């Protein structure tokens, strides 16, 4: 496989996450890379996007022509609503999230470990943005998918144990990176798919946690046009 | 329209050391006109409850920028560099609260409940020092109610009885805060006669609203 | 309109020993057409959660009259003499729950919370045998979440995505129950195309609704 | 004072309770006698009636012409809504009640005692209607007024201690009967007003609890046309 640009890597991860979604799923996408998943879902599939600031049925970013100052996403950007969308207050929004009514939450991570622990909200002494809605999303969603680049400036992000303060304990189900797809199982990290052109040694070298091999290790599918 | 107040009357409601809730999410649905008046009045040493601190130029974050806040309860402060800077320098005390927990803590205060039993934050620093209550075999963090002296909210359509409808995503924390403060002021985008809003379209019953404020039109 | 079901499909959802929530307040906003189907299907030994039992002829009380209920959670049973009679004879087990506590127990189940901390019932038989939790010097009763296998609700206007608007006083327990059951069926007074309800007018988001049922018009 | 009919007694009590209300008060009226208070408030006063089944701004009972099947009171009777009324679900309705946003709750009682304890929901072995919204109303309202006839078939209802199961402990503020107006104070029952033609001996004879006399004992006002 030829060298991919940063943008191609991000698209490849977002596209692979989109393959995990099912028709009718209620999905919350975090800002950054996870938000790209919205562009990659099959056109005949209906995915309901939940925006934790108070909308179910988010459509896309609004262009200047359709800009409604009363309608923004969780990043504060102007958006459009799909037909049949509904709005609500923050208590009701997090009742949807915490109550298990979101099928899939996709978010980024600073660290994920063998137990499914997730750290993505604070680097003590360096970065304290706050957790926003992330802690509720990770606890409440039926399935938690982490979509991220495999390493941070070469340092592994998939660890035996997170050393940053946690966002939530034991909630991550799946991790998708540009190197492969890893399930968090009762026995630790289970490698399900390897990206084209990546071998076991390479992915393990970039992963602190021990990768167990799934019985049916597959090649990770990527978009046709990549 | 006995609930309407002007800027001068509004400033009478403000005092230093108050505990103030301000609605809005990344300044969407934030009462910018009411925030203007706090800045103009010079009110300081405020305890602020607001889900985020917007930016230094927008929403409740303007009060951080103007150095009026002594203590802050919020879920996210990353979009306003001033908040982090004042926190690091020790000028500003910050309590970070998960967004859903913040919403329920405010709601529980308004509803006369003893707080919230939330699973959010278990096994994280958020749980440290808090009571853990087990219900039906599951652990929950006991998070106490959160109330204020004053809630400043924004409504898209407000009728003359104080009933409020919020358009689009501008509800966010506004209807919750309306229930949990001693005094509640709504900044109205539009004021209509009572009866123009259908009973089932109203998000905030007028009994929660003490005063209605409309920003003066500076552009004639 | 993939969510629509007819009477035959509805009956597939029913089975003996189920835990069913039914909306309505004194039968106002009760899904009478869905109750008809339970009666016709012969479903029995039901655990019913309903704020009152209407009358023997109206609302969830018809299921008491038809002797389908083994256990009942309700706040008021005085308007249906059948309920008291079956309770006294030992046929029906009744747990009385204060109305506001019942509402919050259902809401907390739907919201993923560990129940409610309510001051209601302190010093009364309602508090007996329950955990008392002190918060900020005040006592509260810990009341656990209340969920069900099936919620049967009624909506005034339902769109094809399952979004619901309730008119007048017909909301009552309907929107709460919609959040707290594995399967939710709404009986629609009127069905409209998605998009006809404004996002801010919707009380129950369509994601909570599994199926939409409309009573067959027997009068041609 | 001449002998009053049962209807006149009820009206006298309801009228006296109405004098306790202030312009702008949010009031919840129980069924039966308390519901009559709505007819007795001054015409220039705005009282907002809360109906716990989900309406603020109840107007009156609907006649057949204005009958809307979607609008009923807590007794299930068709009603009309005042201009500016709003409706809500039961959680929000009891948030208003329990959260202290109702100024005055007026209800009937089987028993009230010196501590302000109230019993009005159950007579074990005889009558088990359930508490409905009464327990929340008594705990949540800023002021609790009991409106009732002074005795039940000659037996006192104002007791040293209730012996029926309680609706709420120590929440009653005022009791209005056809014999007088009694405040529940830190020292027990304080007689504030005596009905016209009633003497101290008579009211005490019909009251089990000891009645303390207010410094300024007054004659209870009654409607002019009674």
Image (spheres, coloured by chain):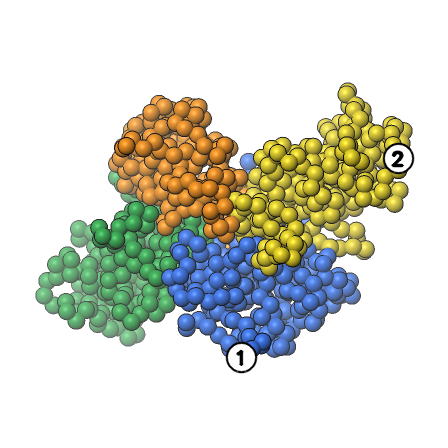
Chain colours: A yellow, B blue, C orange, D green
Which quadrant of the structure image shows residue B84?
bottom right
Q: Chain of mark 2?
A: A
Q: Is residue A87 visible?
A: yes
Q: Nearer the viewer, residue A145 or D219?
A: A145
Q: Residue furthest top?
A: A215
Q: Is residue A62 left or right of residue A16?
A: left
Label 1 crowding class (10 Å Cα cut-off): few <14, some 14-19, many 20+? few
Secondary structure category for the residue under label 1: helix
| Residue A99, quarter of the rendered image | top right
Where residue A116 sits: x, y (%)? Answer: 73, 36
Report whether residue C76 is seen.
no
Q: Nearer the viewer, residue A130 or A27?
A: A27
Q: Residue at x 77, y 64 (%)?
A: B85
Q: Are marks 1 and 2 in contact (CB under 8 Å)?
A: no
Q: Quadrant of the N terminus of chain D?
A: bottom left
Q: Is residue A69 above or below residue A25?
A: below
Quadrant housing residue B45: bottom right
- What residue does disc 2 label? A2
Name the residue beneath numbered marker 1. B8
């Amino acid at each position: 496989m030829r060298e991919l640009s940063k943008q191609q890597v991000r698209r490849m991860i977002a596209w692979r996450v989109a393959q995990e979604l099912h028709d009718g799923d209620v999905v919350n996408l975090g800002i950054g890379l996870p938000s790209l998943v919205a562009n990659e879902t099959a056109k005949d599939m209906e995915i309901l996007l939940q925006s934790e600031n108070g909308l179910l049925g988010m459509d896309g970013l609004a262009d200047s022509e359709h800009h409604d100052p009363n309608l923004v996403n969780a990043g504060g950007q102007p958006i459009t609503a799909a037909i049949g969308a509904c709005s609500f207050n923050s208590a009701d929004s997090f009742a949807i999230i915490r109550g298990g009514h979101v099928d899939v939450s996709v978010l980024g991570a600073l660290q994920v470990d063998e137990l499914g622990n997730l750290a993505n909200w604070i680097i003590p002494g360096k970065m304290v943005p706050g957790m926003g809605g992330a802690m509720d999303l990770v606890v409440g969603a039926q399935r938690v998918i982490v979509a991220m680049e495999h390493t941070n400036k070469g340092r592994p992000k998939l660890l035996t144990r997170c050393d940053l303060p946690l966002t939530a304990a034991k909630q991550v189900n799946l991790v998708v990176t540009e190197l492969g797809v890893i399930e968090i199982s009762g026995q630790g990290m289970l490698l399900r798919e390897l990206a084209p052109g990546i071998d076991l040694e390479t992915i393990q070298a970039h992963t602190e946690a021990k990768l167990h091999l799934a019985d049916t290790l597959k090649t990770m599918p990527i978009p046709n046009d990549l | 329209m006995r609930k309407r107040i002007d800027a001068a009357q509004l400033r009478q409601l403000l005092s230093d050391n108050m505990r103030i809730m301000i609605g809005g999410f990344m300044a969407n649905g934030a009462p910018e006109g009411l925030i203007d008046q706090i800045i103009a009045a010079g009110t300081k040493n405020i305890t602020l409850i607001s889900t985020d601190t917007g930016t230094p130029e927008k929403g409740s974050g303007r009060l951080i920028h103007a150095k009026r806040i002594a203590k802050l309860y919020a879920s996210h402060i990353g979009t306003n560099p001033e908040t982090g800077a004042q926190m690091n320098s020790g000028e500003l005390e910050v309590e970070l609260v998960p967004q859903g927990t913040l919403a329920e803590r405010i709601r529980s205060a308004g509803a006369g409940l003893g707080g919230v039993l939330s699973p959010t934050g278990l096994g994280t620093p958020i749980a440290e020092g808090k009571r853990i209550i087990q219900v039906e075999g599951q652990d929950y963090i006991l998070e106490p109610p959160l109330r204020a002296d004053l809630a400043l909210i924004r409504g898209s359509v407000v009728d003359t009885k104080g009933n409020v409808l919020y358009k689009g995503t501008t509800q966010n924390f506004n209807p919750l805060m309306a229930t949990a403060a001693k005094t509640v002021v709504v900044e109205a985008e539009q004021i209509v006669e009572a009866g123009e809003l259908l009973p089932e379209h109203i998000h905030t019953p007028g009994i929660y609203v003490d005063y209605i404020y409309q920003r003066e039109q500076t552009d004639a």
